[in-house]
């Protein structure tokens, strides 16, 4: 597998939606908003197998102290091959020196993020107002 990594927002709406659909994320239901959200990200790293978008991570930052990583996703058939870890590594290198790097992980992904250097916070709880009631 010859995976190519790129710091780019050069993908179309369909490629992005197909990636999100592959992992069954609700964001795929809003392809125009999703594309706008990713384009408005501070940084986006992608993983490609030829012309196929197989992974993505994005960041939102205040530019000096805080950065959060809203999305990290890898197509299911490419998971457990090191792509997600490499995308996280690229993004952490991008924000070396920032005081706080944060994300919200699904419970089943916590161990993966711990292997990437993140720790579960204590005394805090993620809170949401979500447009989806499910």
Image (cartoon, helix red, strand yellow):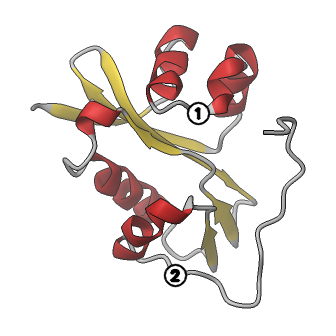
Q: Earlier in the sequence, mark 2 or mark 1?
A: 1
* Mark 1: few/some/many CA within 10 Å (<14, 14-19, 20+): few
Q: Position of residue 121 (x, y in %)?
A: 64, 83
Q: What is the count of numbered marks? A: 2
What element does badge 2 sit on? loop
Tell me the quadrant of the picture where the C terminus can be found.
Answer: top right
Residue under the point 34% across and 50% down: 84
Q: Which one is nearer the viewer's eye here, 112 or 37?
A: 112
Q: Position of residue 12 (x, y in %)?
A: 52, 11
Which residue is denoted by mark 2 in the rendering? 119
Q: Quadrant of residue 107?
A: bottom right
Residue under the point 67% across and 29% down: 27
User: Would you say 3 lies left or right of 13 here?
Assistant: left
Residue under the point 48% across and 71% down: 96
* Foreground label between 2 and 1: 1
Residue under the point 64% across and 76% down: 100
User: Would you say 50 lies left or right of 121 here?
Assistant: left
In the image, residue 40 sits, relative to residue 95, either above or below, namely above
Tell me the quadrant of the picture where the N terminus can be found.
Answer: top left
Distance between the alpha carbons at the discs numbered 2 and 1: 24 Å
Q: Position of residue 82 (x, y in %)?
A: 22, 52
Q: Residue furthest front?
A: 134
What element does badge 1 sit on? loop
Q: CB of mark 2 within 8 Å of CB of mark 1? A: no
User: Would you say 51 lies left or right of 70 here?
Assistant: left
Numbered mark located on residue 25 in the image: 1
Q: Quadrant of residue 38?
A: top right
């Amino acid at each position: 597998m010859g995976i190519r990594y790129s710091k780019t927002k050069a993908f179309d709406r369909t490629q992005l939606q197909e990636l999100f659909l592959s992992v069954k994320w609700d964001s795929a239901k809003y392809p125009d908003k999703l594309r706008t959200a990713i384009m408005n990200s501070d940084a986006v790293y992608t993983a490609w197998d030829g012309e196929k978008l197989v992974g993505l991570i994005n960041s939102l930052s205040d530019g000096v102290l805080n950065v959060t990583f809203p999305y990290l996703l890898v197509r299911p058939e490419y998971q457990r091959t090191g792509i997600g870890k490499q995308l996280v590594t690229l993004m952490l290198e991008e924000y070396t020196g920032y005081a706080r790097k944060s994300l919200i992980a699904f419970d089943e992904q916590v161990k993966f993020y711990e292997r990437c250097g993140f720790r579960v916070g204590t005394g805090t709880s993620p809170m949401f107002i979500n447009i989806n009631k499910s």
